[in-house]
Amino acid sequence: INLTCLGETDNSSYRDRIALRIVRAESELSVLEKNYLGAVEKGDYASVKQALEEAEIYFRININCIDPLGRTALLIAIENENLEIIELLLSFNVYVGDALLHAIRKEVVGAVEMLLNHKKPSGEKQVPPILLDKQFSNFTPDITPIILAAHTNNYEIIKLLVQKGVSMPQPHEVRCNCMECVSSSDVDSLRHSRSRLNIYKALASPSLLALSSEDPFLTAFQLSWELQELSKVENEFKSEYEELSQQCKQFAKDLLDQTRSSRELELILNYRDDINPLLDENTNDLARLKLAIKYTQKEFVAQPNCQQLLASRWYDEFPGWRRRHWAGKFLTCVFIGLLFPLLSLCYLVSPKSRYGHFIRKPFIKFICHTTSYLTFLFLLLLASQHIVSTDPNRQGPPPTVVEWMILPWVLGFIWTEIKQMWDGGFQDYIHDWWNLMDFVMNSLYLATISLKFVAYVKYSGFRARNEWQMWHPTLVAEAVFAIANIFSSIRLISLFTANSHLGPLQISLGRMLLDILKFLFIYCLVLLAFANGLNQLYFYYETDEGLKGCKGIRCATQNNAFSTLFETLQSLFWSIFGLISLYVTNVEADHQFTEFVGFCSYHLFSCLACVVSVQDHADIEWKFARTKLWMSYFEEGGTLPSPFNIIPSPKSIWYFICWIRKHIFKITRLYGHGQTVDVFDKILSTCGLCCFQEVLRNLVKRYVAAMIRDAKTEEGLTEENFKELKQDISSFRYEVLGMMKGKVGPGGGGGALAESKPSEEAGASILVYPDHSFKYSSKISPATPKTNMFPDTTSILQQRAALSSTSSTSPSTSQGLNRLVNGSVVPSWASTDTSSNPTSSTPISSSSSTPISSSSSTPIHSSTKDRLARKDFPKDICDFGLYSVSEEMGEVDLEELDCDGEKEEQGGARERTCTENEENKERGE
């Protein structure tokens, strides 16, 4: 009964379990193949070489077999970074497949070089079908060696591939409608997008940019801009493209970090590929820095070396400006600012004079323009305070003295904007927010002047202001003029960028405004939603007239706050600022539920309106904005501030005449020796380009050295380092064992082994065969002729017939004859303890057909039994014998064991002889 219950319990517990089975079976490896891959994993050079040689003779293993992880022997060697094993496998023409890609991903430079120099054999050996399946590969078809090397950003591997003449596919635009892009997108849109992303990821590699680009700065600028535009189009991979764009910007900044002198820095920042840097006089205009600003390379512009050069040019006339006291700086600026009318007149009369050159300095020009604008704001203040009194009831008043004084500044501002748009282009003009504000401000002033002129012409009488129409030109002009004054005052904030204290605050304000605009968009949706609901709720409770004849939220006692949609929008908006009372949600009727719903909706809206997010921004933003401000004053032209810039100067008249001669009459300057000048220009252009390329070459060398140094510093100890150390120790272990085996090998073969190369034939090891350990030595050289199997097989058959009668007394004999090693029998009793059967200690010779003979019955010491059995092995078996590691270590003490045995049997005389033999052996070694 107990057994039955136990059986029922076991069956019930078994029914509660889930039977598991392998549903996707893989091909199993044979024992020899497992040992072969294990030897590759451990770095056992001798065993791997032995297995490869056996595979060429007997075909017992497939040298291209794969382990459960899908790795071939070559891939295992690459993961372990064992270059000797890789070289050995390639010499036996193993299947390469994606080994080069794996070596690149592991960044094994030596393996990549071997694989690149390896010539593919004409006839491939047996390759598992799974290796030929593209779906089994770890890499997509669009991944090429150069693309993968660029992803890893390994400079040495990229250099090896570029030297081999590899090429990179050119990515097409996102909106490309060519046949290739259309068909690829239709077949697999995901693969098409991923392929483009992989190509751009490779192109953005800093090592590839530094190695293959003639102008790394220009390439990085253009590529970062293109990637930034791609991030706006392909929203699915927006973060990836933005990261690549930032990587290009950081590369340009890091490359500029390597400049060591002002000459190198100026040559980089002033370089232009369209003019001769040694011949043209306008090469000192920081063309490369302007290009960086155009492509919004904020990291490049804010780089300390670049900022130092800009600062030195900005304070050209005042070398020690930053070391002065703030009071001295203030007085100097005030003094120069008060002199700006005189300096402007000097420049108008003689631009090439001393004072004309003085006002052209960037810092002096900035002070003069700032003083001029402050004067304009002062005039606006006088106009708003009505210093000149006028009759308020006059419908078309004439301009006052202050307004006449404001007019030249307005015309000067408009002329400045026209010149800026003409010089920089419309696209660059509208990309600056301050230019848009200037455009609006100037438009408002023009509208004010036009409306005042219309009012002066059309309305000339007097009339009470309260009786004027709502859209009277004078009223509209006054409102527009007030708005223009607000914009003019806010425009002063842009000048704060030049100050290190106010500049970051101005950047924060600008960024905050953008965030506020984004918030207001969401806020308007919330506002409209709640306004619609509250209006629908309170629409029925609208009163005809409020208290004391006032209706709405602007009354002393607010009422009808949600009666109409417009009133509801106003009420909700002003509630953010606490200007709406809570009793506006009450109704005259006793409808408490209505009041409760309205009260909850109103307060929920107030909570949502309080959620505002503002970002913090780094110092880079301010430096970039300050550089844009400085560069506007580094430009030639625009020297005179308003209103002096509207006065035609002799220089402007001369430039206008030259422009007419060149573009209208087609008159150009002719050289007397045109051909000579052309040759001279080409020589100077080549010299300038060589100087630029020399500086770039030095920068790239320093950058690569710094990149490698930083990578080693940041890497530290990782799991890969421990794996490499383990592999080195394992390989060194087998090398040491091989050296020991070569010195004291059986049969006196140590001398021949000692003369051979350690990397080729040193070492002995083990491959665990089923049931028995076959002992072997790796002393067979590739030049050794193959063993003839016919006499060995004949000898085996004769010996097996002779042993058939004794199989009952020695049960392991028949089992030991079941396996062949190079045509030789290695009986199991040849390597085991023979204490139970001392008469069977002599092995069978593979080259003789003599039956087994019994040895002497003299007792043998247990420590020398294995040694005697080993010594009596036939030479061909001994040379090929598969010794175990423990027996290899035991052979090191072979002579000592001999000496110990002789001492016990023959006494002290034999001990002296052994000692002499040892000393002679040490001298010989």
Image: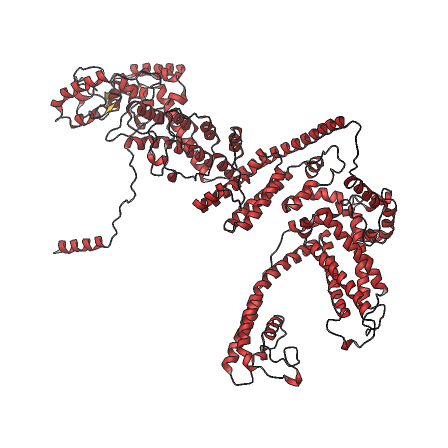
Give the side of residue 457 with respect to residue 15, left or right: right
760 shown above or below 537: above
Q: Which quarter of the rendering shows the N terminus?
A: bottom left
Give the side of residue 535 with respect to residue 665, left or right: left
Residue at 68% in and 40% down: 288
Image coordinates for residue 646, horizontal then vertical, percent: 82, 52
Residues 628 and 39: in front is 628
Image coordinates for residue 870, horizontal then vertical, percent: 26, 21
Residue 242 visible (yes or no): no
Picture quadrant where residue 375 is located: bottom right
Residue at 66% in and 82% down: 550
Image coordinates for residue 226, horizontal then vertical, percent: 58, 45
Residues 790 and 819: in front is 790
Give the side of residue 171 with respect to residue 425, left or right: left
Image coordinates for residue 292, horizontal then vertical, percent: 65, 44
Picture quadrant where residue 55 is located: top left
Seen as rendered, the residue at the extreme front is 665
292 shown above or below 892: below
Residue 338 visible (yes or no): yes
Q: How is the image coloured?
A: secondary structure
